[in-house]
Image (cartoon, helix red, strand yellow):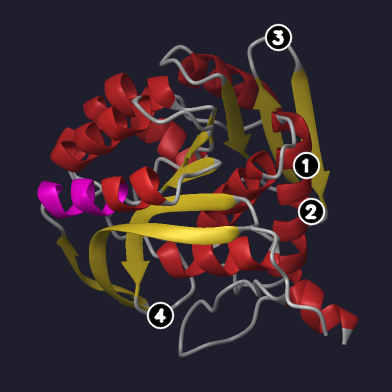
Amino acid sequence: MPIRTAVPPRVLTVAGSDSGGGAGIQADLKTMLALGVHGMSVLTAVTAQNSLGVQGTWELPVDAVRAQYRSVVDDVGVQAVKTGMLASAALVETVAELLAGTDAPVVVDPVGVSKHGDALLAAEALDSVRTKLLPVATVATPNLDEVAQLTGVQVADEDGMRRAAEEILAFGPRWALIKGGHLPGEAVDLLTDGSAEHWLRAPRYDNRHTHGTGCTLASAIASGLALGQDVPTAVEGAKAYVTGAIRAGFALGGGIGPVDHGWRTRAAD
């Protein structure tokens, strides 16, 4: 077989580590590989985490995060960046400053709590997310719990999703993707830049093994952007990828298992 010489687009994840492999940088890198880009990482925090919950978190020093970022961006370069767990106000502000000086689209997943309800962002960091991080985002991807944390808006229906999008856009991202997966009925998300609205709908599968959905979706969007897609196309493709990964999610341990990042490869076997 011929040796591949073309360099794939490069995507950087700035996020925490999930020792159970279902979310965080582990999910990000699996997603990036599955979607044909080269994944790189800046580790912001270490978690002791499994299918039952988060047993501990340890954030890295600001200098370590900055050094990782500069090491990768200054030498390898990036075509897109995705942020996840940033843990503290100091890390949020450091990462926002680094992103502001990087010429690449940014997908911000404003991670506040884990799938099990464990806090992954200090309460005092919320204002830094609003005023420093969201303004540098190309796309912000909050779920309904994160919408409530950031805006106070409690979403109960699709009209509430519109109101939530308006509130998120007021913080400065170019696009807001409000994820309605916690609402009853089909899995519906709203993507808008304040002008155009794109409603993305998918069947809801009866599968409790959904650990890592938010990380996976944001990384899939970043991968699409790195491949040259516009925002609506990247989000639509990411939604389709995550829907398939949720459908194929599998049991792992005694709690909530992960989505299957390799579902397309296995489906082709």
Which residue shows up at 64% across the image and 17% down it? Answer: 193
Is the C-beta separation of discs 3 and 4 under 8 Å?
A: no
Is disc 1 placed on a helix, strand or loop?
A: helix
Mark closer to the chain start, 3 or 2: 3
Which residues are the magenta region?
Answer: 62-69
Which residue shows up at 42% across the image and 64% down it? Answer: 25
User: Residue 138, percent across and down?
Assistant: 53, 27
Q: Is residue 68 magenta?
A: yes
Which residue shows up at 40% across the image and 80% down it? Answer: 20
Asked if one can make out residue 69 in the rendered structure from this viewpoint, the answer is yes
Could you give the CA–CA distance between mark 4 and mark 2, rounded to whole angstroms?
A: 24 Å
- Tell me the amino acid under the disc marked 2: Ala
Residue 240 is marked as: 2
- Tell me the amino acid under the disc marked 3: Ser
Could you give the CA–CA distance between mark 3 and mark 2, rounded to whole angstroms?
A: 23 Å
Is disc 2 placed on a helix, strand or loop?
A: helix
Is the C-beta separation of discs 2 and 1 under 8 Å?
A: yes
Q: Is residue 256 left or right of residue 171?
A: right
- Tell me the amino acid under the disc marked 1: Glu
What residue sits right under mark 4 in the picture?
Answer: 20
What residue sits right under mark 3 in the picture?
Answer: 195
Q: What type of secondary structure mainly makes up the magenta span? A: helix
Res 174 quadrant in image: top right
Residue 236 is marked as: 1
Q: Is residue 194 left or right of residue 254?
A: right
Could you give the CA–CA distance between mark 2 and mark 1, rounded to whole angstroms?
A: 6 Å
Which residue shows up at 23% across the image and 60% down it? Answer: 45
Res 59 quadrant in image: bottom left
Above or below 148: residue 266: below
Give the quadrant of the C terminus. bottom right
